[in-house]
Image (cartoon, grey):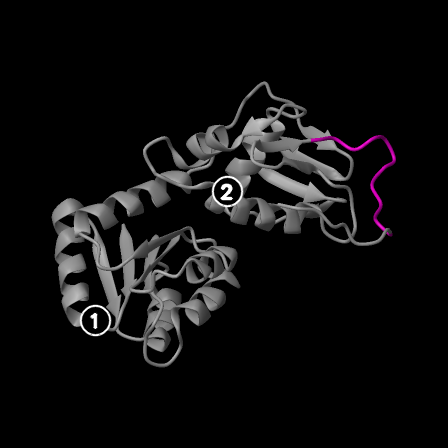
């Protein structure tokens, strides 16, 4: 496994490198001390997971994340001294899979990385499960392929798992805690704010262009996947508005 750590703090790089190698003897730890070097290492080595600082010389972690997400869905964990909630939400909305606040013990960080890697593993194919179709949205559970009006929809592993559990319970309200446990795991500690961010990301991809609304929110309770009535997909309609 290849782990890319991008951080301008050498003691942190040294500590994480040692911690990762002690935990995973076959791990290859790649390090970079600024955003530009991090992007070069990313494109050259194609790591399995990226640990990315926010405040660095040159490109910020947010800029690096944006560049990574243009071409890859590799799991990215943001590591930063900033504790402001808006920074965390911004990182998640830009495509980060997790956000950890410094200082953090390396064993805690390792646990977060394990969780991110577990979530990147898609649900196993269901051999007897037919394709799921709702309006213009179609899902092939064998290939994990999602299409909207026949065009492929590129989802991250977490977004796919969230959609998977919603459609497998279509028409039923999925409480916040149930979705958090099924997508992130009972011991992970993800909050409803995480869920809100990922629901927004999923909606932006499957409810685009004024099409049908597939995910309903019951404020303070949970989310429900709903199938539109026949012919209700409004491909030429106006924009949708809703509360997350």
- Left or right of residue 138: residue 102: left
Residue 228 magenta: yes
Q: Viewer-proximal residue, 188 or 52? A: 188
The relative height of residue 22 versus residue 11 in the rendered view (above or below) is above
Position of residue 83 measured from the top left corner of the image (x, y, whole percent): 34, 60
Residue under the image location 34 percent in, 38 percent down = 188
- Foreground: 111 or 74? 111
The circle on residue 9 is 1
Give the mark toward the camera: 2 or 1. Answer: 2
**Which residue lies under the disc numbered 2?**
195
Q: Residue at x 60, y 24 (%)?
A: 169
Inspect this view and state whether residue 118 appears. Answer: yes
User: Extreme top residue here?
Assistant: 128
In the rendered image, residue 173 lying in the magenta stretch gets the answer no
Circle 2 sits in a helix, a strand or a loop, which is it?
helix
How many labels, in total? 2
Q: Which stretch appears magenta? A: 226-236
Q: Quadrant of residue 2?
A: bottom left
């Amino acid at each position: 496994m290849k782990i890319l750590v991008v951080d301008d703090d050498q003691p942190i790089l040294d500590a994480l490198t040692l911690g990762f190698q002690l935990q995973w003897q076959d791990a290859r730890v790649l390090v970079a001390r600024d955003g530009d070097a991090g992007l070069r290492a990313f494109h050259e080595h194609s790591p399995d997971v990226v640990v990315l600082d926010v405040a660095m010389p040159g490109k910020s972690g947010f800029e690096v994340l944006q560049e990574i997400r243009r071409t890859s869905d590799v799991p990215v964990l943001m590591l930063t001294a900033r504790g402001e909630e808006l920074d965390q939400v911004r990182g998640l909305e830009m495509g980060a899979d997790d956000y950890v606040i410094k200082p953090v013990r390396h064993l805690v960080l390792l646990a977060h990385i394990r969780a991110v890697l577990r979530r990147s593993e898609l649900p196993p194919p269901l051999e007897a499960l037919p394709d799921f179709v709702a309006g213009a949205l179609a899902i092939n559970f064998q290939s994990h392929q999602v299409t909207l009006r026949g065009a492929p929809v590129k989802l991250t592993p977490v977004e796919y798992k969230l959609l998977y559990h919603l459609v497998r319970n279509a028409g039923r309200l999925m409480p916040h805690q149930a979705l958090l446990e099924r997508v992130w795991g009972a011991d992970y500690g993800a909050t409803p704010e995480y869920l809100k961010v990922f629901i927004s990301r999923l909606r932006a991809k499957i409810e685009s262009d004024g099409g049908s609304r597939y995910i309903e929110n019951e404020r303070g309770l949970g989310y429900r996947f709903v199938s539109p009535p026949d012919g209700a997909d409004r491909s030429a309609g106006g924009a949708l508005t809703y509360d997350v």
